[in-house]
Amino acid sequence: MFYEVFMNQAEALYLEKRYDEALAALQQAISHAPDELMPYFFRGLVYHEKDFLDHAMADFSYVIEENPDFPGAYRGRATTHAAKGDYGLAIADINTAMRLAPKKAPLDYFHRGRWCDRQGNLDEAIADYGKAIKLDPKFAAAFLMRANAYCEIEKFDLAIADYTRAIALEPQDTETYFYRHLAYRDKKNYHAAISDLSKILELEPGHEDALHARADLHAKSGDHALAIADYDADISRDPENYHIYRERADSYAALGDHAHAIADYGKFLEVATQRGDSKHMHETIYRDRAASYAALGAHDLAIADLTTFIELGETDRTNEFQTRMTELAEGGNDGMEPLLAAPMQAMAKATQGTDFAAAFAAMVGEGNQYRNIEAYRLRAASHRAKGDETAAAADTAKATELEVLVEERDRARRAAKNKRDH
């Protein structure tokens, strides 16, 4: 009798997400009926929700050991394996649960699909999402995840069709609109992508990413006035995001409003300097601001910015790269987003003791030679506009020298490739 009271109490507390109280009730249930398996199973569920994954694993494994035909315990252990990143073990357990369960469950296929997806087995993931949908045609999350998988393999039309079905089932879900806008964007259907972003802002005016994404797409579409309006609103919403000034500057420049462009480029560089950013992180801004200075006839300022841009491109950055790679290998993140920092840290560890930094610096240096051809020609034009033909001729000669160097290197690489291929 007491066992049932405590179990009913624990189940109610679990559903109300009062997990600590649920654990106390389950402990009471176990003390009154230590041979019953359900308290251990429910405790595993509670531990999982509290992110005590090792405790959850122990409880689910105990239930399985005592009753190998308990599908729920395999499901619980499968989700715990997945939460720990052990997707192969998760799939093995969910397969056992599906074999033991008397009835096929859409959620089992959905979970297995997600774990296949995480392993990069997209065809299997798509098949499982499809099975989940067949069992439950109103399973919006399965349509969403299958759409995401289709995007991974660049089947954008199929993805858009699935996103649209998911939206029909859950028309208030802004996440699905955002994903569909990405598919439209990748198909270069900017009008449809912008429409989805506008719908998100209608449903959730303070959406963190939609406003900025819409501004970028307006700019890509050539609608720079609309882009600037969205960048204005985005700056009001997030004045600390100094990158928006750079993007708004590009739109001002595209409209020929070079005075506002220069002001925004300057604001960006001011904040970047205050943050301690390396000039190399934002070197192209000097070239872009120079173009606006030149358009306004401020050729001395244009020459100064182009000189900075060229000098940054000609700097040997081997030591800088080596220092940054060492910091990454030791666990630093160099201010990067977590999703980018993790693979960069892994690469840094894998390349320690090698000439990777030197090779990477050389690759960057070669890329800079291409871009400096244009910079020398732009600087030559500003020198010429000032009447300094000697400086203009020197920059023109340097651009020509780089063109010859780049062409000879490219020709040698083409010849080497042809030799390897034959």
Image (cartoon, rainbow, N blue to C red):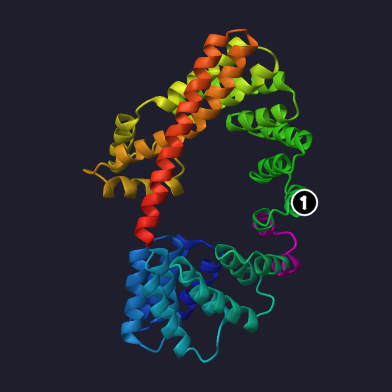
Residue 2 x %, y %: 44, 78
Residue displayed at 76% across by 48% down: 198
Residue 379 x %, y %: 56, 19
Tell me the quarter of the picture where residue 237 sits.
top right
Residue nearer the viewer, 252 or 119: 252
Q: Residue furthest bottom?
A: 102
Q: Quadrant of the C terminus?
A: bottom left
Magenta stretch encompasses residue 179: yes
Left or right: residue 418 compared with residue 357: right
SS type, badge 1: helix
Q: Is residue 185 above or below residue 270?
A: below
Looking at the rendered structure, the kind of residue marked 1 is His
Secondary structure character of the magenta stretch overall: helix
Magenta stretch encompasses residue 139: no
Tell me the quarter of the picture where residue 165 sits.
bottom right
Q: Residue furthest top?
A: 387
Residue nearer the viewer, 328 or 108: 328
Residue displayed at 56% across by 23% down: 377
| Circle 1 residue | 191
Tell me the quarter of the picture where residue 154 sits.
bottom right
Left or right: residue 52 compared with residue 226: left
Residue 21 x %, y %: 46, 62
Q: Is residue 27 visible?
A: yes
Q: Is residue 70 above or below residue 79?
A: below
What residue span does the magenta drawing correspond to? Answer: 165-182
Residue nearer the viewer, 270 or 23: 270
Residue 72 x %, y %: 45, 81
